Amino acid sequence: RTLRCEAVPTLHNHAELPANNNNITAKHFIVGVVMAAALVRALVGLFAVGAGEARRTSLAMQYKPLRRHANLFEDWTEWVHPPLLHAIRSSNASALLDLLREEAGGGDSSGVYSLPLFLDAEGGCAFCDLLLDELDGYYASGLPIERPNSMNNYGIIVNAIGMRPAIDRLQAAVLHPLAALLYPEQAEGGFTSHHSFMVKYKAGQDLGLDMHTDACDVTLNVCLGRDFTGAGLTLCGLRGGEPPSRGGGDGRERTLRHVHAHTRGHAILHLGRQRHGADDIVTGERYNLILWNKSSHHRLSKDFLAKYRSRPPAAPGGEAASGGEEAAPPDLACLSYTHDDDYENYKPYPPGKKPKPRGPGGG
């Protein structure tokens, strides 16, 4: 049998290379550049996270000898409302539901609930007093204070001052069982992290907070006090919500659902994609403890990506933010001057606020 050999194109045999070789090479080069840029961004992000954690660990160590209440840095479950803790530990779903109040119904595991989280047997909130005193102590220490998030200007990241281990225990022992009952999709696989912080509202500082959704899967919002009037919590619809015909909620993110009045020692529990905002405080000062709970398992799901990346469409006559239109004009209380491109179509911007930039860099 005779073997027949044929020439194989090589890099030096240009005549036998495909005619569009230069195009293929250019495409490969562009893909390589994009991938390299993505890798650089990821590495920069990891470095920033690592640097942030290192800074917070250093702050916690510096503050440790100045702590006023050492038990606040160990385990918060001892202050949980006794009937609530008993219902959770005994896996009594019926007793647990009796302690919850549905503030805004979702009908599809997307409701908003209030509960007596840190009420003691006498109906007071010793935990609130202790935590506020501890935070006052941190303010008095003169140590650096990191802004809690991109919207609140006043408050403290409580993880940064050494309270992460105590909140880890609360999340596992109390928050996850509650979320598994109310939001099974988001709680599946357990919570894997949290961003926990205190926010403060008072005259001369932050009066309230514009409409927004949270960068988490499930939010816990605890009212610590102090004395105040006003400063309610306005709750609207869900980002990425489905209409009732598809088995979902109201399907409109900018639909007013409920205005909640905060009560000391009580908490609000809702999905991170719930649009909400803090109404302006009238008198006094209000402090709230916020826990943003995240699940890596849920965040890898297609459902999460589809719902969380969506943006509210504009109402008829408005400038669409994500293509398409809402079935009816949005409720004015649910508009966001920070996030809605069509805000000015319905009412003027608040004093000191400017329209969102358009084109590259806007959004």
Image: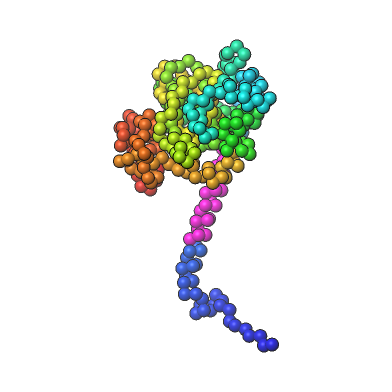
- Where residue 53 appears, as percent x and y from the top left, is 59, 37
- Say which quarter of the image contains residue 252: top left
Residue at point 36%, 47% (across, down): 359
Residue at point 59%, 83% (across, down): 6
Q: Is residue 243 above or below residue 115?
A: below
Residue at point 33%, 30% (across, down): 350
- Where residue 97 appears, as percent x and y from the top left, is 58, 24
- Where residue 83 appears, as percent x and y from the top left, is 63, 19
- Quadrant placement of the C terminus: top left
Q: Is residue 236 above or below residue 314?
A: above
Q: Is residue 10 above or below residue 359?
A: below
Residue at point 54%, 21% (across, down): 266
Report if residue 307 is visible in the image: yes
- Say which quarter of the image contains residue 325: top left
The foreground one among 50 and 61 is 50
- Quadrant placement of the N terminus: bottom right
The foreground one among 285 and 244 is 244
Colour convention: rainbow
- Where residue 128 appears, as percent x and y from the top left, is 56, 18
The answer to whether residue 45 is magenta is yes
Q: Which stretch did the figure color magenta? A: 30-56
